[in-house]
Image (tube, helix red, strand yellow):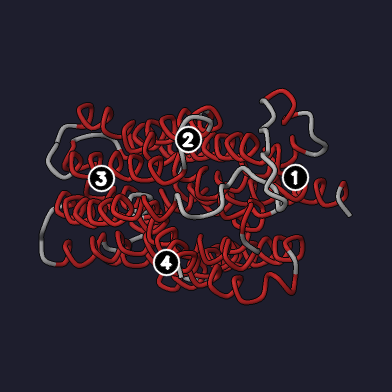
């Protein structure tokens, strides 16, 4: 009974992780006008958030040696709730950046902690459902903003409402902390022996670990580029801000749907095949964005999201099995940090390119990272047949 309650709380915690991730891209077409900054300035906020997440994820292995998963999760959610609330009341671009950093610091540790916990103790099905929970969180923002924009309310109301959701989830996790102590400790083997986590240097020497880090960088580069710029791309092609926010939400519905479907089949199909299938679906979605009329772009966005669905959870789930449980927490932190390097710099780079060239580069830019992700995951697959 306790284990069932705990996995539900973990899923709820991952919903909280997804709440802030979709907001900036959906809000930005109106947000940059309100803040009186150039459209490319979204990259600065995104880089600041991801910079905080990189710091948080990279230091997670050290934090995990001193604190347990439950308090790490509760404190991290409180940080993101505080950041969201600040976004809801500040209307100055530069004043937002410290709170963007707080958002990032809150996201990195909880991401690493819960991913490592589920990878060590659950099958691929639960990992996929975990990230489907993240997808549920990401669907809230765009549709909430579309509702608010249609009623001539500002983007700040969206951040205020999401902050309330986040504080409620923080309260649930905090109340549940005593339950976590009744579960079997994360850092133990099946025989109850204590696992001593290896250091950074030893973890990075594990066979194929470089390809794992590259794969996470490429995946998050293409995912976050789509998350941040799909609404702006649609507005540049003549879609209204309200419709663009709603259509951008379909990307996240695709991700969530893909992870729910993945949860039912991944244990039978296997992580490697799920990754290959996901990449193939992403390629199809990007091709549809290129060839379909702009009013049907939502089809391509949903398919791209559906392809994204199985990639991240399956790549994470491989970690303890490919590199060993003793390297799992350390490599998980490094993988999350690498993922957020892709999230930090690659969407920002596209912002600069679109500002100086054209926003029409959007689908082709994503294609570059699809190719890089395919290369990295196939290299890793060959090492572990």
Query: Are discs 3 and 1 less than 8 Å apart at CB?
Result: no
Mark 3 and mark 4: Cα distance apart in space = 23 Å
Q: Decide: is 374 above or below 293.
A: above
Q: Position of residue 380 (x, y in %)?
A: 80, 47
Name the residue: 29% across, 38% down. 79
Neighbor class of circle 1 (other Cα within 10 Å; few <14, some 14-19, many 20+) is many
Neighbor class of circle 3 (other Cα within 10 Å; few <14, some 14-19, many 20+) is many
Q: Decide: is 198 above or below 79.
A: above
Q: Nearer the viewer, mark 4 or mark 1?
A: 4
Q: Decide: is 132 above or below 203.
A: below
Q: Quadrant of the C terminus?
A: bottom right
Q: Secondary structure at mark 1?
A: helix
Residue corresponding to mark 1: 376
Left or right of 91, for residue 371 = right
Mark 4 and mark 2: Cα distance apart in space = 34 Å
The numbered dot on residue 81 is 3
Neighbor class of circle 4 (other Cα within 10 Å; few <14, some 14-19, many 20+) is few
Name the residue: 55% across, 64% down. 304
Q: Nearer the viewer, mark 2 or mark 3?
A: 3
Mark 1 and mark 2: Cα distance apart in space = 19 Å
Residue corresponding to mark 2: 344
Q: Is residue 232 visible?
A: no
Residue corresponding to mark 4: 5
Name the residue: 38% across, 42% down. 71
Q: Position of residue 181 (x, y in %)?
A: 45, 49
Q: Position of residue 278 (x, y in %)?
A: 66, 64
Mark found first going from the N terminus, 3 or 1: 3
């Amino acid at each position: 009974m306790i284990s069932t309650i705990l996995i539900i709380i973990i899923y709820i915690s991952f919903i909280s992780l997804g709440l802030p991730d979709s907001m900036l891209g959906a809000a930005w077409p109106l947000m940059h006008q309100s803040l009186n900054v150039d459209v490319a300035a979204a990259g600065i906020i995104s880089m600041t958030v991801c910079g905080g997440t990189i710091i948080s994820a990279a230091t997670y292995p050290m934090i995990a040696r001193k604190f347990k998963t439950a308090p790490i999760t509760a404190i991290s959610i409180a940080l993101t709730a505080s950041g969201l609330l600040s976004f809801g009341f500040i209307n100055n671009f530069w004043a937002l950046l410290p709170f963007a950093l707080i958002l990032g610091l809150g996201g990195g540790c909880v991401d690493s902690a819960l991913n490592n916990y589920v990878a060590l103790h659950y099958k691929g099905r639960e990992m996929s459902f975990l990230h489907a929970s993240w997808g549920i969180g990401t669907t809230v923002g765009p549709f909430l903003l579309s509702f608010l924009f249609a009623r001539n309310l500002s983007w700040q109301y969206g951040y205020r409402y999401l902050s309330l959701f986040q504080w409620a989830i923080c309260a649930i996790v905090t109340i549940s902390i005593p339950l976590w102590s009744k579960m079997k400790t994360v850092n133990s083997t099946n025989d109850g022996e204590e696992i001593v986590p290896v250091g950074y240097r030893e973890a990075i020497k594990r066979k194929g670990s470089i390809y794992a880090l590259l794969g996470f960088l490429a995946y998050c580069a293409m995912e976050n580029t789509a998350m941040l710029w799909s609404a702006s791309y649609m507005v540049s092609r003549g879609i209204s801000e309200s419709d663009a926010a709603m259509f951008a939400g379909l990307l996240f519905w695709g991700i969530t749907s893909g992870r729910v479907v993945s949860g039912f089949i991944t244990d039978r199909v296997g992580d490697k095949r799920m990754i290959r299938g996901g990449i193939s679906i992403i390629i199809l979605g990007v091709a549809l964005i290129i060839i379909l009329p702009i009013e049907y772009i939502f089809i391509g966005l949903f398919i791209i999201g559906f392809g994204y669905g199985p990639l991240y959870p399956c790549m994470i789930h491989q970690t303890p099995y490919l590199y060993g449980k003793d390297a799992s927490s350390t490599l998980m932190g490094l993988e999350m940090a690498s993922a957020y390097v892709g999230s930090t710099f690659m969407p920002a780079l596209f912002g600069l390119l679109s500002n100086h060239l054209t926003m029409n580069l959007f689908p082709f830019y994503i294609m570059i990272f699809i190719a890089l992700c395919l290369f990295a995951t196939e290299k890793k697959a060959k090492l572990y047949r």
